[in-house]
Image: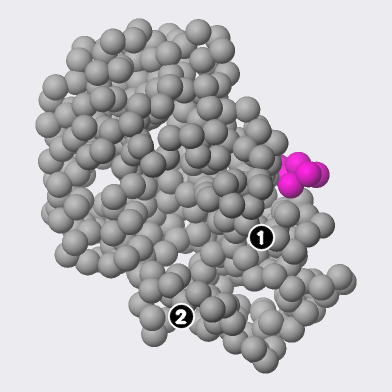
Amino acid sequence: MTSSLPIDPLTARSLTGVLPQLIASVSGRPDWFPSARSAVVIVADGLGRGNLSQRSAYARFLTERMTKRDSARTVFPATTAAALTSLFTGVTPGEHGIVGYRVRVPGTSAAPNQLTGWEHDGLDPHTWQRSRPLFEREAAAGRPCFVVSRAQYAGTGFTTATVRGAEFVAASGIAERLASAEALAAAHEGALVYAYIPELDVIGHGQGWESDRWAAELESLDAELRRWDRQLGPGIGAVLTADHGMVDVPAHRHVLLDEGDPLLDEVEIVAGEPRMLHLYASDGAGARVASRWRASESDRSWVMTRAEAIGAGLFGAVHPEVEERIGDVLVAARSGVAYYDDRSADKKPQRMIGQHGSLTDQERIVPLVRLGAFA
């Protein structure tokens, strides 16, 4: 029930505030961060504050730099598509409209992937994502804006939807991306630079964030950031953050929904992602679907109707155009479980270990580590 939902502290910083605060810093109006000549935001995908703290032995530089106040809350759902869109628009999912990993297009049976569906399912990056990207606004006002990422993300629908207006600079390895970000920040007064690091998230999904491989990658990233911080030019402020944290859910903790399962009665579409389902019910069946799921799953998940989730403010203020994108019933895992529609012929997603999307602190609290002129 909504009454048992976790509540963010009134003083908690939101991921939606990070880019506006960097703009304030380079505009001579510092608040979260000191004034800087230019600013870099580094997103280490999947690196929650809890993940970082629990693996502190592999990240001595970052944990030494991270004080108790150096954190933020990502949005709900705690998933890349929703969180990065919020980071780059400065608004919550209820406003920009990217309310999950897979969500239904109202009035249809389609529930496209919000990262890749732009290319495959006809989502228009200029209209489906409803809010103007901050990079586009700032670039139009004359500010130099740059995105440093892997070449494969150049020109994608999601890139267009979220960071249009910025110049895309392709770079392969982490060291090359960081070096490019520093060079751009040094060369352009007042610049905003975004550097994307997806490596930890990829390893976490495949092997788990508690794996030795993930720890080794964190150690490597920590070493690169230590070197990079030492060579940052004067006046360049930087912050390392993330879109979400991660929990490991081994196969024996999967909840498989198969044909004949009463939890699927009157459910037309199972979308969202394994730790935060959007369930789209038959007409008029939402309350019954919610009741069945509460009876079965309330000991390990938060189960709520669309109206309850909106009333609780989980998506922020919800625009009328966005309302029907949200499932009739939402199931957000509270314990270490993940839900899969086992009727799907594609079993590949069930091989994922590291997961995210729900409301737990492990998934929603992310670091804000200050580097360079912000340290």
Q: Nearer the viewer, residue 220 or 229?
A: 220
- Specify the amino acid type for callout 1: Ala
Residue 185 spot, x, y in % from top left:
30, 17
Q: Disc 2 designates what residue?
A: 254
Q: Is residue 146 above or below residue 186?
A: below
Q: Is residue 243 left or right of residue 101?
A: left
Q: Nearer the viewer, residue 353 or 91?
A: 353
Q: Is residue 215 above or below residue 151?
A: below
Q: Picture quarter containing residue 283?
A: bottom right
Q: Marks 1 and 2, how far apart in space?
A: 22 Å
First of labels 1, 2 by sequence position: 1
Q: Nearer the viewer, residue 372 or 198?
A: 198
Q: Does the magenta segment cover residue 134?
A: no
Tell me the crowding category of disc 2: few under 14, some 14 to 19, or many 20 or more residues within 10 angstroms, Cα based: some
The quadrant of the image that shows the C terminus is: top left
Q: Disc 1 designates what residue?
A: 111
Residue span colored magenta: 317-322
Residue at 28% across / 33% down in the picture?
171
Q: Is residue 236 left or right of residue 321?
A: left
Q: Is residue 48 above or below residue 124?
A: below
Residue at 55% across / 40% down in the picture?
157
Q: Secondary structure at mark 1?
A: loop
Residue at 80% across / 44% down in the picture?
320
Residue farthest toward the bottom in the current orientation of the protein: 260
- Specify the amino acid type for callout 2: His
